[in-house]
Image: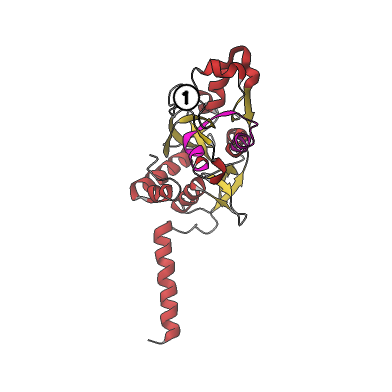
Amino acid sequence: MKRGVRDRLRAALGACMLALACGAPPAAGEDALRVVLTPRSVPFSYIGEDGELAGFNVDMAKAICAELGRRCALDTLAFPEIIPAVASGRYDLGVANFLRTPEREREVAFTVPYWRSTSVFVGKAGRRVGAVEELLRDTPVCAIGSSGQLRFLIERAGTHVANVRAMPSNQDVLDALQSGECPVALLPTMQVLPFLQSARGQGLAFLAAPLAESGLGGTVHMVVRPGDPELREAIDRALQRLIASGVHERAARRYFPFSIL
């Protein structure tokens, strides 16, 4: 076989293998799936050194698009803005680690779970957290705006609600922890673990055992624009296939040292 023919066959075979690994290519003329993520939530979604979005949620969004045979149109917003933007129909899918609550269910549709979450208090190593109400009497505590962690703190702050500080993103809270602006923060465990394992997180630690009650943990979902049950069902089927085939687990292991389902 001539070398040129052999090279073309190899290229064709490589393209076929990629298609099998990543799902069917987008159909001609198929509309893009409009996906919104947070830009500062390492290791879930963040802007890499090359200026491109990276992270577990980005990988999962792209895998869903491949399963659906649609092109991904990725965009970013601060966490508090994502559910309103999906609810308005500006985006089809929001991938930002949402716990399912009755309030949110009135605005958007939820997919099947794709990982499980807990929350944890973080601060300088050696400090201990007891009763939350006592902590908030004299200590500012930060959390991501519009999050379940923020709501939990506000509900327990009483007259000391001024000590509850809302910030736009996970990374903003971590930056404030590092600088000392926030002595203590309440964050999703999986979003703070990589930070504590990095050089920037030296001197900081979990201050108590992870929490799952009172809306601080449970199954984590993506959100879908309301009024389109067919889209939600298609995304659910895609997620279930990705989990069953092992694609989800392999993606998770690139960022976490253990299973997150």
Q: Quadrant of residue 212?
A: top left
Where on the picture, by quarter, is residue 155? top right
Residue farthest bottom in this picture? 2
Q: Is residue 21 left or right of residue 164?
A: left
Main SS, magenta region, reads: helix
Q: Is residue 93 visible?
A: no
Answer left or right for 6 relative to 141. left
x and y, in percent, of residue 62 in the image: 50, 51
Q: Residues within 10 Å of mark 1 (few under 14, many from 20)?
A: some
Per the rendered image, the range of residues in magenta is 172-195
Q: Secondary structure at mark 1?
A: loop
Three-letter residue code for mark 1 = Gly
Q: Residue at x 41, y 44 (%)?
A: 239
Q: Nearer the viewer, residue 58 or 202?
A: 202
Query: What percent of the width, then of the height, locates residue 83?
Result: 58, 33
Q: Where is the C terminus found, in terms of image quarters?
A: top left
Return the residue at label 1.
215
Q: Nearer the viewer, residue 155 or 223?
A: 155
Residue found 61% across the figure and 18% down from its top: 138
